[in-house]
Structures are given as structure tokens and as C-alpha cells.
Amino acid sequence: MTTSARPPQDASQPRRRDARQNRERLIDEARSLIAEHGVDASLEEIARRADVGVATLYRNFPTRDDLVRALYDIALAELFAVRAEIEAAPTAWAGVVLYTERLAEWLVADPSLPPILKRMATIDPTARPSVEFEGFIASLVAQAKKDGDLRPDVDSMDLAVLVTMIGSLGTLGGGYTGQWRRQLSLVLDGLRMPEKPRPKLPGRPLSVKEFQATVHGLTRRAKRAARGSRSAD
């Protein structure tokens, strides 16, 4: 009688699974703690909450900046995942609505994002991986205006500022967090072309450089960019 030989068990498989789960817990707890205390939150506390040793944290993220970069990359992947959904919208206006809804929901759900963005500007002031997405939204806004659905004195940076403002409700917690849909509905009503003319908006929208400088915490490089943009107006 013959017996079939069992394939040798890969002893590394459980370790790889454990390592992946440890990394995922560290990411989750880092987001939570950064939302509470900013990017200078205790790395030891992140490891404790993730139920791993500090050595495991440093094995995954040798420096605090490595952790911030990882969180930033995850955030960008989440942002770009929304693009296909926006592109499938039946009209440009519907795409604008979807864009504002998804981004506001994203920011409310993860209050760690603003401090992560600010720290990334310090780590790498030249990093602008979202440029392509910004161009996509700008073209969507232009089409919505051309269709007569979006008021003509609004541009994509206005949307970015408004979504950032609404998303900040996530940092307040409590009853404020659940208010974002209502506040966004009020904003969208103000953006849509009315049946009767409304007064023109005061001032002007921020340029892309000015918006980036504001969101990323006004580094010296960003300040120069913003000043240069203002002087050119």
C-alpha cells in the first residue's frame, strides 16, 4: 500500500500572516492616535495599543517619517479609488456632488489626515502625487459650469476648501461628526446654478499653490509659492 506524501508545510506562512496583521494593527492604531494627538503621538503608545512590541513597530517603520509616509500612501490610494466612481457619474454635476460627498466622508471618518498631510509637506515639499487627480477635478468643474449646473464663479479650489471645512467636523467629535451630510447639502445648494441670479461671490478662489500651502501648514517653500501666486494676480 502506498501513501501520498504530504507537501512540506511552509513554516514561514503563519509568520507572514502574523507580520501582515501586526502591520495592519499598527496602521489602524497610528491613525487613531494621530487623530487625537497629531503626528508627534507616542510611538510606544501606538505599539502598545496594537498589542505588539516597540521592536515590531520599528521593524515596520524605522522612523516616524516612515510611518507618516506609509499612512500618506494609504490615503492617496483611497483617494484615487474614488476616481472611477466619479467618472461613472451620469453628469458632471453628479460627479461634483459625488466628489464632495466622498471626500467629506473620508475626512470626517479619518481626522488623522490633515496632520499627516502637513507633516508630508515637511518631509518632502516637492511631493505632489495628487496633481493628476486635481486636473481631473478641474475638468469636471469646467464641464459642470459649461452644462449650466454649477455657478460660473466657482472653481475646483473652492470645492477643495469647502470639503476641507466640512471634513474638519470629524476633529470635533460628538454630535458634530454626524452633521457633515447636512452641512454639505447646504454647501451644494449654494454651488448649484439658481433659477434666479445670486450676488457674485466676494473675493477670489485660492490658487492651487495657495491651497497646498494652506493645507500643508505653510512651510517656507509653500509660503514662497503662495506669495508668488498672489503677486501674479
Image (cartoon, grey):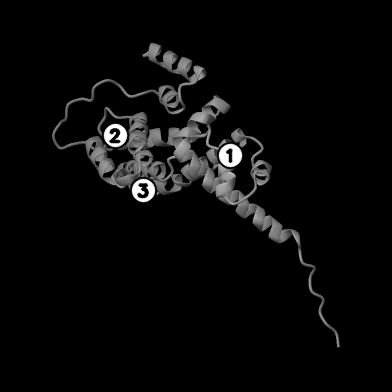
Q: Find residue 223 and name its label.
A: none
Mark 2 vs mark 3, CA separation in Å: 16 Å
Q: Is residue 71 left or right of residue 1?
A: left
**Dot 1 amino acid type:** Leu
Within the image, what quadrant is residue 198 found in? top left
In-front residue for pair 90/168: 168
Estimate the x, y position of residue 80 in percent, counting from the top left.
48, 43
Mark 1 vs mark 2, CA separation in Å: 47 Å
Q: Residue at coordinates 42% horizontally, 16% vertically from top-left? A: 229
Give the structural element (helix, strand or loop) at label 2. Answer: helix
Whether label 1 touches label 2, CB < 8 Å: no
Q: Earlier in the sequence, mark 1 or mark 2?
A: 1
Crowdedness near tag 3: few (<14), some (14–19) or many (≥20) residues, C-alpha within 10 Å: some
Where 51 sits versus 123, above or below? below
Crowdedness near tag 1: few (<14), some (14–19) or many (≥20) residues, C-alpha within 10 Å: some
Within the image, what quadrant is residue 201 found in? top left
In-front residue for pair 87/191: 191
Q: Is residue 173 left or right of residue 216?
A: left
Give the structural element (helix, strand or loop) at label 1. Answer: helix
Whether label 1 touches label 3, CB < 8 Å: no
**Dot 2 amino acid type:** Lys
Q: Residue at coordinates 56% horizontally, 43% vertically from top-left? A: 45
